[in-house]
Amino acid sequence: MVTMKPQSWLIRIALSAVTLIILVLLCAAPAAAIGVLGAKYTGSIAPGGTDTHVVTIDIGADEPATDVLVEVEGFGQNANGVYIPLDPANDLNPYSARSFISLANSTIHLVPGTKQSITATINVPQNVGPGGRYAILYIRSLPGAGSSLSTAVVVPVFITVTGTTPTETGSILQVGTGAVTIGQPITITTTFKNTGNYHYYNAVNEVTVKDSNGALVANASTTPMVYALIPGNTVQFVTQPNVNNLQAGTYTVDSKVLLGGQVLDENSTTFTLKTNYVPPATESSITVSPGSPATLTSPDGRYSVSFPQGAVLSDVVVTLGPYPSSQLNRAPSGAKLGATSFQITGLSGLLSKAATVKVTYSADDLAAAGGDASQLKLSYYDTAQGSWVILPTQVNTQDMTLSATTNQLGVWAVMVSSSTSAGAPSSSSTKAPLPAMLSIAAFAAVVIIVNNTGRRRQ
């Protein structure tokens, strides 16, 4: 019977771990990047006519050999207008050309540094209706040896039916403002559908906000849409008018979608403020120096950060600005987010001496706490730990302020909590990529080997 020394046992375990990590890393090698020539088809075909489109596909000379699959899919779009492929079960658009297209071959094997072509044949039926027809050639690498991932390219197909009249129309299905919250931007979402029979580019959304007397409060417009809006598809235009302080009352939002200056459709909605509205803080900055104290205050005076002398080791430009509540990580168990959020940026590490953060809480913050201001706390999100840190907070109900000391900047929020302990990691927190975590584990395993080898030599 052979007795294994503890050091030898640890070394074997570590070597096994390193071997396993290397194998996993090899299996997670990135997929080959696909290059495509002929990445878009735009052609006019008469009813009963035929055309072809050649797509040439390649990979780089230093890429691994790759199998590539080409499929004919329906032409979908997400809310931002980005083109997405639709499988046959979900391709219900009456303007689909998916069934018109056939491929000479759908799978090819690419050797590094070589090219291959696939020909798509388009047969337009004799009884096709007017306008345009649309499909997507979806090209993607197939995971294989040395890769567990896939890269993909979308080739849009735009067919104009010759001899027919295109119509460019649209309909606003909905205009919404969501919940209007003090200290957060007013976001207006216009849901719009192409109700014509032809695609169009450069659609623009214009929005106005008026008070109960019809006076203009704010307006906004989007940049022209860079994607073509396909008939039958629906997109959303999102605007955030630069609204100043608003008194409690009812406001009307009017939304128009235009094409080439012509109004395609117009719709409106209203929202009611039960309390006065205050917009998000505008961005402000100061230079903090080691030799003197400094205070950074938002232009509206609702937020401030006071740095004592010696808080930094060298001159640092610190910026205070808004942070969307929609992008906040979820509150920890036993707590909930209030309405106020902001960010303090410019410092990569910790302060040498703690600063004091002071915030004027809003009526919406107080409502979130059920009217109990003592439940309001200042908190920051610790990205290293992936969790909220809820700080001991002084509450002044006379001037409606919260203050706390901290040596860490970053993203801040008013939290409703009876506790001041750090929260559990949020489910939406950022985690290190798998290869990075495995590399750390590999390093730890090597340290074990080195340490135990050193002990054996002593």
Image (cartoon, helix red, strand yellow):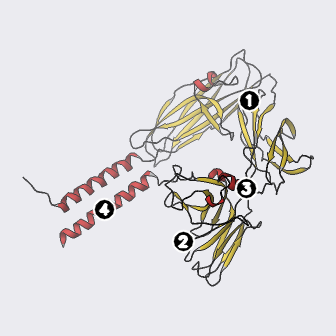
Could you tell me how far apart the alpha carbons at marks 1 and 3 are, in whole angstroms? 45 Å
* Residue 107: image location, x then y, percent: 49, 30
Of discs 1 and 3, which sits in the foreground? 3
Name above or below for residue 356 compared with residue 209: below
Check disc 2 and report the residue beneath it: 350
Q: Residue at x 69, y 72 (%)?
A: 296
> Circle 2 — which element?
loop
Circle 4 packing at 10 Å, graded few (<14), some (14-19), many (20+), is some
How many discs mark residues in the rendered view? 4
Q: Residue at x 79, y 40 (%)?
A: 203
* Residue 28: image location, x then y, percent: 41, 47
Q: Quadrant of the C terminus?
A: bottom left
Circle 3 packing at 10 Å, graded few (<14), some (14-19), many (20+), is some
Q: Which mark is residue 446?
A: 4
Q: Which mark is residue 274?
A: none
Could you tell me how far apart the alpha carbons at marks 3 and 2 are, in whole angstroms? 32 Å
Check disc 3 and report the residue beneath it: 363
> Circle 4 — which element?
helix
Amino acid type assigned to the residue bearing label 3 in the image: Ala
Could you tell me how far apart the alpha carbons at marks 2 and 4 are, in whole angstroms? 31 Å
> Circle 1 — which element?
loop
Q: In terms of sequence position, does the residue under pointer 4 or pointer 3 come before the other?
A: 3
Taking the image as drawn, is residue 328 in sight? no
Amino acid type assigned to the residue bearing label 1 in the image: Pro
* Residue 287: image location, x then y, percent: 67, 76
